[in-house]
Amino acid sequence: MEHLSRSAALTGYADLSRSVGLDPFRILNAAGLSRRVLIDPDLKIPANAVGRILETSARRSGVEDFGVRLAEMRRLSNLGLVGLIAREQPSVRRAIEVIGQYIWMQNDALSVVLEETGDIVILRTLIASASGRRSRQSMELLVGVTCRTLASLLGDGWRPQLICFAHGAPNRPGAHRRVCGAEVAFGQDFDGVVCSRRDFDAAIPTADPAMARQIARYSEQAMRERPLRPEDQVRELVALLLPTGQATVERVAAHLGVDRRTISRQLAVRGTSFSAILESVRIGVAAVHLDGGGQSLTSIADLLGFSALSAFSRWHTQRFGESPSARRARRGAIQA
């Protein structure tokens, strides 16, 4: 099943594309979308088409930070019902938890995973891709919107502690720092926002408990009507477990509260398998770090869940017909 997004994902696209010399309607047409998607924010469109539009726009305009510039134009209201739900929560923590719970209403390829370590809170942002291909511009838009959402809840003076991207640094990261309001680190092992627990636990003074209850009833009904996608649940868990070396069907099944036979049966009905999903996630992670990041091959092997660099090298050579070091050297020569 194809991932779908609200057309609100392209809010501000027409103005930004024109400002950098592009014809937005021509690019939309090439992606198979009508100009209506720029007028009606509630149309359902293929999520991968949004990624293609952003990547094409960045490439044709030569604006490598196109996605993060688009994030700069966003407001909490652009999230539609999801933003309304978040605004009425009693704390920032609860608002982000609710956004993670209902983000599928905005785009069912997106996930937000919360991790806490001491006084630090990490919001990992994920974009599912059946092909294993990663859209740099889509991820920069998602992380930028996450920052803008937090700022709208905490006030314009709020700043995160750090912004992380798994892909390599652009030539000019100024827009990233301006939009996100913090230092930005590239070539990391995750995409997301790092902030303090104190900020995360801050109260939202404008929250209306009665409104929150009313919205919750509507949202719970929508959740019951949401189609289940076992392959997406498995893919998300594989992406999270891969760096630990424990991305096994048994571990994923335990997280989902079922046995491995149930996982295999559900995926077979969907025309896929656990091993196919594991392979697609590995391909995507490898592409990010070999083609754009600056991490060592040993670190990349760890992120892919391999016990040794030699195992990673054998897998990559069998899969792509060249060693990881040869691929990195070739990509470097192309970019030069």
Image (cartoon, rainbow, N blue to C red):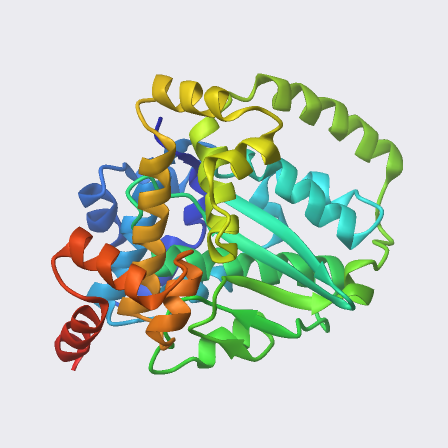
The residue nearer to you, when weighing 52 against 84, is: 52
Say which quadrant the N terminus sits in: top left
The residue lying at 55 percent from left, 22 percent from top is: 226
The residue lying at 44 percent from left, 74 percent from top is: 186
Q: Position of residue 206 (x, y in %)?
A: 84, 50
The residue nearer to you, when weighing 258 against 133, is: 258
Residue 119 in the figure: left or right of residue 101:
right
The residue nearer to you, when weighing 165 against 311, is: 311
Residue 114 in the figure: left or right of residue 166:
right
The residue lying at 43 percent from left, 37 percent from top is: 5
Res. 41 in view: no
Res. 235 in view: yes
The residue lying at 36 percent from left, 17 percent from top is: 269
Quadrant of res 172: bottom left
- Numbered-mark total: 0
Residue 287 in the figure: left or right of residue 274:
left
Q: Position of residue 190 (x, y in %)?
A: 50, 62
Relative height, residue 166 to residue 266 (above, below): below
Say which quadrant the C terminus sits in: bottom left
Quadrant of res 328: bottom left
Relative height, residue 69 to residue 227 (above, below): below
Relative height, residue 133 to residue 226 (above, below): below
Q: Position of residue 295 (x, y in %)?
A: 38, 75
Q: Position of residue 156 (x, y in %)?
A: 70, 69
Quadrant of res 109: top left
